[in-house]
Image (cartoon, rainbow, N blue to C red):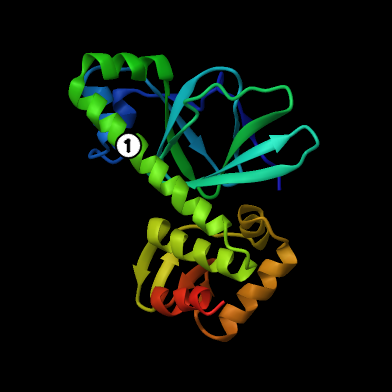
Amino acid sequence: MTKNHLNQKKSISTFSESSSNNFPSYNPWLLFFNSNKISYQIFLLQPNDIILFDSSSRLYIILIGSLIITKVFKSTHKITLNLLTNGDTFGQLELANDNFYYEAEAIGKTKIACINYNTIIRACSNYPLFNLFFIDHLICCSEKTYHFVEIMSHKSITSRLVSLLLLLAEQNGTQSNNGIMLNFAMTHKMLAQIIGSSRVSVTRILSELLKTKLISIQKKKIVVHSPVLLSQRILNR
């Protein structure tokens, strides 16, 4: 599958008042930016589109969707660092290095707001309430990162995959008649990339979960029938 690569000097579209109706009006970031006339840009990413980080310092805010944050070495070796979703941010540090770089890959259709990080710093100085909001946001991000590290710390590949499915169901799932359906299709290869395993191992584990009817596949999307029963697979490992 072809991947489109974007860097921080290129955006899909620039925000305008006429386009604001495409995004949730209750989004706290956009409410603040719009009310204080702070300019920002909008990225619309398709599945597997990638943002490459250069030496520029910008803040990306996920409005809708999910991305995988990966550290890529010059040897082409990759390490998955985090899984981000609605409301999460990334890119606020200067991440350029001679030996590695970072990329954010969209899992499904994803909409992102982008703003210069210096603008965020000025907003924190000029608006005390926003400063408190931003600090709370960073604390929340740290907690979610810790949760993802906990998932990756499982020695058992089955426990990693089950924990990831439970996390995706919680953060990106929609309640259906027979369980919680993930809002986007996840390939076996992508699941394997996230948990640091092989596609063959992921396929085997998913087959076991399908046979025991803990999950099912509908329209290429995973449905978790009972998070409680599925979580017991972790406890029993």
Decide: is 220 above or below 85. Answer: below
- 230 lies left or right of 28: right
Q: SS at mark 1? A: helix
Across and down, in percent, residue 89 comes to 42, 35
Please name the residue that numbered disc 1 is placed on: 137
Across and down, in percent, residue 45 comes to 52, 39
Which residue in the rendered view is the most extreme toward the bottom?
Answer: 212
Q: State the residue at coordinates (62%, 41%).
A: 70
Residue 117: quarter of image: top left
Q: State the residue at coordinates (64%, 36%).
A: 4
Which kind of residue does numbered mark 1 sit on? Answer: His
Q: State the residue at coordinates (40%, 14%).
A: 118
User: Badge 1: few (under 14), some or many (20 or more) residues near its Cα, within 10 Å?
Assistant: some
80 vs 85, nearest the viewer = 80
Residue 177: quarter of image: bottom left
Decide: is 110 above or below 163. Answer: above
- 36 lies left or right of 224: left
Across and down, in percent, residue 115 comes to 41, 22
Residue 34: quarter of image: top left
